[in-house]
Image (cartoon, rainbow, N blue to C red):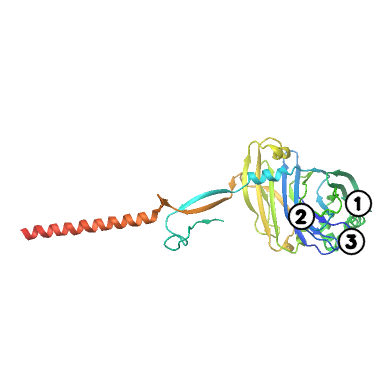
């Protein structure tokens, strides 16, 4: 889907402190910035071959300005996204919580413990450089957005540096494959309305739309991260969609899959009001340096619905009394009654013989 690079404008470069599923974070000299959470949604329209990506970052640190660069395979349209989209997707994909009874006592249950028991399962100015073309620039809320093309990786690096984006040689090298494939770029500069205010909390989401033959989620820049990474991705399409491979991380896990028959609100604004299949995917990258490519999103073998369920295990009781205890006591009483009957029967037979 997308790859994003957040960077500070001005000053000399220090090593990236954080990278997420969207790219690399590069603070300027004397400033710190990090991403606490990055949430992405992809809408893939197979009929029109159109991909829409909505991203929102929750940041922390003392940086007052930042830049975000995202490679895209074709000319992109950029606009502000609706913050309500992610709240709606969170609600739609929320796990279910169910109670589950068990019969025999476990650790924590009487008589093993006096506890209650129970467990839960688990942008930039428009100056140009050779090989770079600015194809558009616009102001979107707090963002100054430029759309550009690049035919040479060194030229792209020169353009970014001339416009205040200091990139390391290592990061420029990771951008080279996108330049070689003639991808274009969306470069975004945060232009806060109130000067001197550090970037903190959730930033306004951006929605980027472009044509594409196959939906992708670029991840290559995340290989620069120095700490384990996590990817949380919503995919909305006509069918259940999943990443084609691991690209150097753990196996991607589907946490939700299901059809939205009549989406409304922010979801409908993104996808339209017709039925759409929503898939939520998460993946962990314990060693980011092993990331070896971008995610290609492909249709699953079947549109099998799925929802994560967390169970609260409870000891089965009858009238507040553990069922196992009632069963044991009942069995003991039946055994005692049977033994008593057997004894009386033997005595009765013994009495008959004596009388004879």
* Label 3 to label 1: alpha-carbon separation: 23 Å
Frontmost residue, 245 versus 337: 337
Residue at (32% x, 54% y) in the render: 330
Label located before the other in sequence (2 or 3): 3
Which label sits in the foreground, 3 or 1?
3
| Residue at image mark 2 | 59
In the image, taking residue 301 as reference, residue 313 lies left or right, namely: left
When asked about the image quadrant of residue 114, the answer is bottom left
The 10 Å Cα crowd at callout 3, few under 14, some 14 to 19, many 20 or more, is: some
- Where residue 243 appears, as percent x and y from the top left, is 68, 51
How far across and how far down the image is residue 133, in percent? 91, 49
Disc on the earlier residue, 3 or 1: 3
The residue tagged 1 is 132
- Other residues around mark 2 within 10 Å, as few (<14) / some (14–19) / many (≥20): some
- Quadrant where the C terminus is found in the figure: bottom left
Residue 224: x and y, percent? 77, 62
Q: What secondary structure is marked by label 2?
A: strand
Between 183 and 222, which is closer to the camera in this rendering?
A: 222
Location of residue 199 (image quadrant) = bottom right
Of residue 114 and residue 317, the one placed in the foreground of this image is 114
First-in-chain label (1 vs 2): 2
The label shown at residue 11 is 3
**Distance of label 1 from label 2 (alpha carbons):** 30 Å
**Looking at the image, is mark 1 or mark 2 nearer the viewer?**
2
- The answer to whether the residues at label 1 and label 2 have Cβ atoms under 8 Å apart is no
Q: Is residue 239 above or below residue 352?
A: above
Whole-number angstrom distance, CA of label 2 to CA of label 3: 20 Å
Quick check: marks 2 and 3 in contact, CB under 8 Å?
no
Which of the numbered marks, if any, corresponds to residue 169?
Answer: none
The residue at the point 33 percent across, 56 percent down is 329
Q: Secondary structure at mark 1?
A: strand
Q: Secondary structure at mark 3?
A: loop
């Amino acid at each position: 889907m997308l790859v994003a690079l957040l960077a500070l404008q001005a000053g000399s470069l220090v090593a990236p402190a954080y990278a997420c599923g969207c790219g690399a974070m590069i603070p300027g000299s004397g400033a710190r910035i990090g991403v606490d959470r990055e949430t992405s949604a992809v809408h893939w329209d197979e009929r029109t071959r159109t991909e829409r990506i909505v991203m929102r970052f929750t940041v922390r640190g003392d940086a007052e300005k930042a830049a975000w660069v995202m490679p895209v395979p074709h000319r992109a349209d950029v606009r502000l996204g609706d913050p309500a989209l992610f709240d709606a997707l969170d609600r739609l994909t929320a796990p279910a919580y169910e109670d589950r009874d068990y019969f025999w006592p476990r650790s924590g249950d009487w008589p093993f413990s006096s506890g209650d028991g129970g467990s839960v399962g688990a942008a930039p100015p428009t100056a140009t450089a050779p090989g770079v073309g600015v194809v558009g620039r616009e102001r979107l809320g707090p963002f100054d957005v430029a759309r550009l093309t690049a035919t040479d990786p060194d030229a792209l690096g020169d353009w970014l540096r001339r416009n205040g984006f200091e990139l390391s040689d290592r990061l420029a090298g990771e951008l080279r494959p996108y330049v070689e494939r003639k991808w274009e770029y969306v470069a975004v500069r945060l232009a806060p309305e109130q000067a001197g205010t550090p970037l903190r909390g959730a930033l306004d989401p951006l929605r980027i739309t472009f044509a594409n033959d196959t939906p992708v989620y670029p991840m290559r820049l995340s290989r620069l991260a120095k700490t384990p990474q996590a990817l949380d991705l919503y995919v909305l399409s006509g069918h259940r969609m999943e990443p084609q491979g691991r690209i150097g991380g753990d196996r991607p896990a589907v946490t939700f899959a299901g059809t939205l028959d009549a989406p409304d609100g922010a979801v409908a604004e993104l996808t339209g009001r017709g039925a759409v299949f929503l898939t939520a995917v998460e993946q962990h990258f314990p060693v980011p340096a092993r990331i070896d490519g971008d995610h290609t999103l492909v249709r699953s073998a079947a549109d099998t619905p799925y929802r994560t369920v967390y169970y609260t295990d409870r000891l089965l009781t009858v009238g507040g009394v553990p069922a196992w205890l009632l069963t044991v006591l009942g069995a003991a009483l039946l055994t005692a009654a049977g033994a008593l009957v057997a004894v009386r029967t033997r005595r009765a037979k013994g009495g008959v013989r004596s009388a004879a």
